[in-house]
Amino acid sequence: MSNRTFTMIKPDAVKAGNIGNILQMITDNGFKIIALKYLQITKAQAEKFYEVHAERPFYADLTQFMSSGPIVAAILEKDNAVADFRKLIGATNPAQAEEGTIRKKYATSVGENAVHGSDSDENAAIEGNFYFSVLERF
Ligand code: GTP
Ligand code: MG
C-alpha cells in the first residue's frame, strides 16, 4: 500500500463555504497536505478525469456538476492513505454515510457529495498527476 491519496472538495461544498471546515477535518485526521490548488475545470477536463465512468448513466450530470464552479484539489499523505481517507469521507450517498464523516456533515445528495477520494493507490497516482506537477508537491 502507498501512503498518498488524492481529493477534491467539490463545487457544492465550495459554494456552501465549507473549504475551511473540510481541510480542518482532513488535517485533524492526520493527513498531511502535499499539494493544494483552487481552480475550476472545464467540462472536457471533467470528462477526462472521470473517463472510467463514461458508460455510467450519471456521467453527464457528474461532469457538468464538477465543471460548474471552483474546486479544491489536493494530494494527501498518511499511512494507509487511500483506505483511511475513504473511511473519513464516508459512503457515496450521504444518506448512508456514517456519523462524523465528511459526507455525512457536508454532502447533500449522491450527486453533490462534497468530496472526492481516490479508490486505489494506482488511481491516486493518476489523479494526482492530472492536477499537479512535481514542482507543486511539498
Ligand atoms: P468519488 O470519490 O467522487 O469518486 O466518489 P465514490 O468513489 O464514492 O463514487 P463513484 O466513484 O462510484 O462515483 C463517482 C461520483 O459520481 C460520485 O461521487 C458522485 O458524485 C457521482 N455519482 C455516483 N453515483 C451517482 C448517481 O447515481 N447519480 C448521480 N447524479 N451521481 C452519481
Ligand atoms: Mg470513485
Image: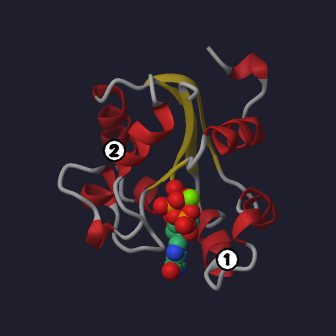
Residue 11 visible? The answer is: no
**In the displayed structure, does residue 64 sit left or right of residue 93?**
right
Task: Say which of 18 and 134 sits in front.
Answer: 134
Q: In which quarter of the image is the N terminus?
A: top right
Residue 33 visible? The answer is: yes
Q: Which residue lies furthest to the left in this view?
A: 99
- Residue under label 2: 88
Question: Disc 2 marks which amino acid?
Answer: Leu
Name which residue lies at 66% across and 64% down. 67
Vertical placement of residue 124 versus 134, above or below: below
Determine whether the residue tagged by mark 2 lies in a helix, strand or loop: helix
Vertical placement of residue 11 versus 64, above or below: above
Question: Disc 1 marks which amino acid?
Answer: Tyr
Ligand 2 resides in the quarter of the picture at: bottom right
Q: Residue furthest bottom?
A: 57
Q: Residue 25, how many percent across, how many down?
A: 30, 36
Name which residue lies at 42% across and 73% down. 110
Q: In which quarter of the image is the C terminus?
A: top right
- The answer to which quarter of the image holds residue 19 is top left
Q: Residue 15, how many percent across, how many down?
A: 43, 59
Q: Residue furthest top?
A: 138
Vertical placement of residue 114 versus 75, above or below: below
Name which residue lies at 61% across and 81% down. 58
- The answer to which quarter of the image holds residue 73 is top right
Name which residue lies at 37% across and 70% down. 93
Q: Which of marks 2 and 1 is nearer the N terminus?
A: 1
- Residue under label 1: 59
Q: Residue 136, how many percent across, how many down?
A: 70, 21
